[in-house]
Amino acid sequence: MKYTHSLQYFQVILCALIGSFIDLDHFLVAKTIYYREIQNNINRGIFHITTIPIVISVFMLLYAQKFVSDCINIVAWIILTAFLSHHIRDATRRGFLMTPFGSTPRVPYFCYIFLLLILPFLISYGEYLTTRLISKTKTDRQINQPLLMDFEV
Ligand SMILES: [Zn+2]
């Protein structure tokens, strides 16, 4: 996959949209569109469960490795980035919701800053590793692919 500026902008916009979309579950849980009623609701919705995007991303990354898909690989990292950055922010108030393992205590402010600072490096390194694995698989398949001339004889 060739990285162009427009592709990078698209990825940033997609990440921002997914990160914003997460809070829509407040409306679903409260079953109302009124902000005041949403503020009073203490329950968190399904999009605020941190284990779900982690599991989905892991499955997408395994799929991307199996079927050599750059696109699925990148989308998996975008989803993980959007959800984790949002959940880290929310964890300062209520902790991480790790269903079915329970939830963590609320994250102290210095920990929140630290997590937000290292998140881009972790995501970037993870994406680098998985992209390299996919490239290696592509190269291996090209090397092991029989030449057309072999079948012409
Ligand atoms: Zn939220």
Image (cartoon, rainbow, N blue to C red):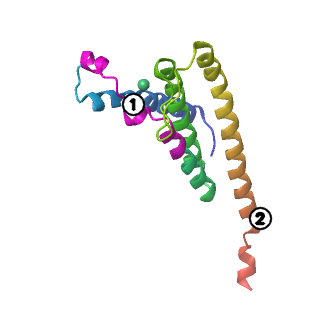
Q: Residue at x 54, y 36 (%)?
A: 80
Numbered tag placed on residue 141 in the rendering:
none
Residue 6 position within the rendered picture, expressed as x and y whole percent measured from the top left: 54, 33
Residue 1 position within the rendered picture, expressed as x and y whole percent measured from the top left: 62, 46
Numbered tag placed on residue 21 in the rendering:
1
Residue 135 position within the rendered picture, expressed as x and y whole percent measured from the top left: 71, 51
Q: Residue at x 25, y 15 (%)?
A: 36
Give the amino acid type for the residue marked by disc 2 in the picture.
Ile
Dominant secondary-structure state across the stretch colored magenta: helix
Residue 107 position within the rendered picture, expressed as x and y whole percent measured from the top left: 55, 20
The CA distance from mark 1 to mark 2 is: 43 Å
Instruction: Residue 129: name its quadrant.
Output: top right
Q: Residue at x 51, y 29 (%)?
A: 96
Left or right: residue 25 versus residue 146 is left
Is disc 1 placed on a helix, strand or loop?
helix
Is 51 part of what is drawn in magenta?
Answer: yes
State which region is magenta.
35-56
**Label 2: how many residues lie within 10 Å, few (<14), some (14-19) or many (20+)?**
few
Provide the residue designation for mark 2: 143
The C terminus appears in which quarter of the rendering?
bottom right
Left or right: residue 86 versus residue 29 is right
Q: Foreground mark, 1 or 2?
A: 1
Q: Nearer the viewer, residue 117 or 69?
A: 117
Asked whether mark 1 lies closer than 8 Å to ligand 1, one says no
Q: Residue at x 74, y 57 (%)?
A: 139
Judged from the image, the quadrant occupied by ligand 1 is top left
